[in-house]
Amino acid sequence: MLHTSRLLSYAHLIQAAQARRGLLEPQARQLGLNSEEAERVLETLHTLSVADGCQVVGRKMIPVSPQEPNLQSGLPTLGYLYEHSLAHAEDNAACIKLRSVKQVHVEPKLVFSLGSTPEQGDSLETFLQRFDSVALALEFLQNPFKGEAWTDEDKVCANGFHSKLLIGEARTMSHKSRTVFDQLVSHSSMTLNVIDQQGSHIVGFGVGRDNVDKSLQQAYALHQRHIESKEESPFAKGQCLAMGGWLPSKQIANGQEWVVVVSGVELPSLRVAIV
């Protein structure tokens, strides 16, 4: 195990890079970080963010590569969502002005809200009933690392590169749909479009079974893991949970408009202009 001071130092470096929109050298490989140590850096970064006044409003899934020997479970890591980085799209459309578009990508996903806090004895069915609504969202990811040598562990340390989350109109989930929502997503499709000076282009298309059809089951497994290790759920009433990206992220540029459409789940399309 690495000395705590080295993990603390890396968390401070990431926080500083995110604050100034600068770039730093990834250090997970150099430090020999494993998944547990990367999560410790993330928790330290979270502690620093809370100390700076950030308010937690939810969690986000940070997918990891199951082929990594130390990540055999394939379960995502849980990052954090903060009040200052969330925005809601009125009428499912919005304009976002970013301080910088350097190394910023957009990633479409689903976001669920929790109507009640999961408890220790929850079965999978009981757990699923605690999610009361779902919405389309676009997450903006800002990579703070130089080059392409960063690892999954670096991404976990940096809270999954989270910068901003734009959430569309939420739709209430029926009692029945909550228990079969993963199956609904499995047979649904998503299209990501970009509109620029050259016109409109489809830049992403995928069906749920390729990426996200087990997301709620993974959330339940993460709930159980946290109950075992920390005796409390990582999820709470009134907070939201952003799933992993349904489609691969795409780099953005000023002047573009991004539109995400899902078929098979009754959710309105979501669009955002980058200004």
Image (tube, rainbow, N blue to C red):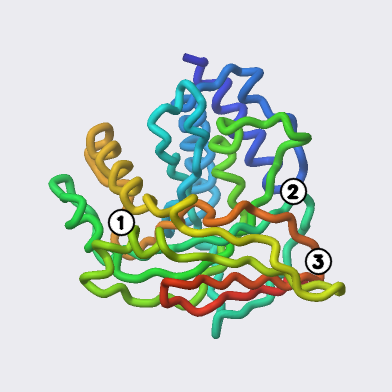
Along the line of sight, which residue is nearer the eye, 223 or 199? 199
Q: Nearer the viewer, mark 2 or mark 3?
A: 3
Q: Mark 1 or mark 2: which comes first in sequence? A: 2
Viewer-closest of 49 and 236: 236
Residue at 55 percent across and 49 percent down: it is 52
Q: Amino acid at mark 2?
A: Arg
Q: Position of residue 29 (x, y in %)?
A: 63, 21
- Tell me which numbered mark, 1 or 3, is placed earlier along the sequence: 1
What residue is shown with label 1? Answer: 236
**Nearer the observer, disc 1 or disc 3?**
3
**Is the residue 174 above or below the residue 230 in the image?**
below
Task: Check if mark 2's residue and mark 3's residue have beta carbons within 8 Å.
Answer: no
Q: What x and y, as percent, mark residue 250?
A: 69, 55
Q: CA distance from mark 1 to mark 3?
A: 36 Å
Q: Which residue is mark 3?
A: 254
What distance separates the C-alpha of mark 2 from that of mark 3?
16 Å
Q: Could you tell me which secondary element the residue under label 3 belongs to?
A: loop
In the image, residue 135 lies at what x, y percent? 45, 70
The mark nearer the N terminus, 2 or 3, is 2
Q: What amino acid is found at the position of numbered circle 3 in the picture?
A: Asn
Q: Quadrant of residue 97?
A: bottom right
Where disc 1 sits, the SS reads: loop
Secondary-structure class at tag 2: loop
Examine the rendered structure and indicate whether residue 2 appears above or below residue 246.
above
